[in-house]
């Protein structure tokens, strides 16, 4: 089964995926993470990507396409989850050309709550564990001992730019998938991570009602 997770930044996609990974051996295509992995190599491409991410802009199509193809060289698993991809119509067409999407899950969250979450989040630079500033005493990741950092694009300017792009280019994909006959399920992402995960599991296990 191939699933896309769509939602405004801060809606809890990363947290939901960490929960899902405890239940399934899934193939995860998390575009933001793949791009940050490239940055971490220190390559010229990584430097270019960092500048784009720090400006809150989308990476250009050719970088996204090559990153996707590199990742998908290892074939799909039983459950593949796409996170942060596709972000616009052009990318959705690219995805259509490589596989069929079974379901789209929309993690629905208001902008106000999303901003609050983003400004309070810390991410582990080693294992991508996500936590809140209020929940930790120092910058050591409780999961792997790595360093917890605020993402360099989690500034008010970066957040606003990403919201603008989300509303203009990504949100309309929900309607596009519906029109194309793909099941789109709305999940209320303002609740606790466990409640959100429970709904996502129902969707994957075909137990949800729409
Ligand atoms: P994320 O981790 O999904 O919040 O992504 C962080 C940043 O990576 C985004 O703000 C973009 O700059 C870049 N990025 C992630 N996914 C994509 C994508 N599908 N297309 C273009 N840029 C992306």
Image (spheres, rainbow, N blue to C red):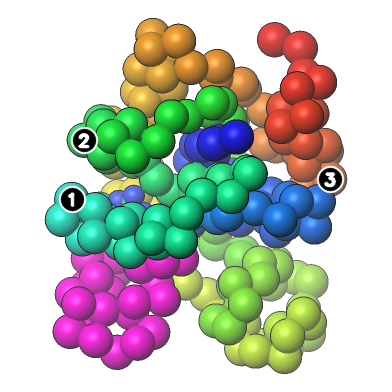
Label disc, if present, on residue 194 of the rendered structure: 3
Mark 2 neighbour density, 10 Å: few (under 14) some (14–19) many (20 or more): few
Label disc, if present, on residue 90 of the rendered structure: 2
Between 118 and 31, the one nearer to me in the picture = 31
Between 54 and 30, the one nearer to me in the picture = 30
Q: Which residue is mark 1?
A: 61
- Would residue 171 appear left or right of 63 to someone viewing this image? right
Mark 1 neighbour density, 10 Å: few (under 14) some (14–19) many (20 or more): few
Which image quadrant is residue 181 in? top left
Which image quadrant is residue 89 in? top left
Q: Are marks 2 and 3 in contact (CB under 8 Å)?
A: no
Q: Is residue 118 visible?
A: yes
Residue 28 location in percent, x, y? 55, 55
Residue 22 location in percent, x, y? 80, 57
Relative height, residue 101 to residue 116 (above, below) = above
Foreground disc of the pair 3, 1: 1
Image quadrant in which the C terminus is located: top right
């Amino acid at each position: 089964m191939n699933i896309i997770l769509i939602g405004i930044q801060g809606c809890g996609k990363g947290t939901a995926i960490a929960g899902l990974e405890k239940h399934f051996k899934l193939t995860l295509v998390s575009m933001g993470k793949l791009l940050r992995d490239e940055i971490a190599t220190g390559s010229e491409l990584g430097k270019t990507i960092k500048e784009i991410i720090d400006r809150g802009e989308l990476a250009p199509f050719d970088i996204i396409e090559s990153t996707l193809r590199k990742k998908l060289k290892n074939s799909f698993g039983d459950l593949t989850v796409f996170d942060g991809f596709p972000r616009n119509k052009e990318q959705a067409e690219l995805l259509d050309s490589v596989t069929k999407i079974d379901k789209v899950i929309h993690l629905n969250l208001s902008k106000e709550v999303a901003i609050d979450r983003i400004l309070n989040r810390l991410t582990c630079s080693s294992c991508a564990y996500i936590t809140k500033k209020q929940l930790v005493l120092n910058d050591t990741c409780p999961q792997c001992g790595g360093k917890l950092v605020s993402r360099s694009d989690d500034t008010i300017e970066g957040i606003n730019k990403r919201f603008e792009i989300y509303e203009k280019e990504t949100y309309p994909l929900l309607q596009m998938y519906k029109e194309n006959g793909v099941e789109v399920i709305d999940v209320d992402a303002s609740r606790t991570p466990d409640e959100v995960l429970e709904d996502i599991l129902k969707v994957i296990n075909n137990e949800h009602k729409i």
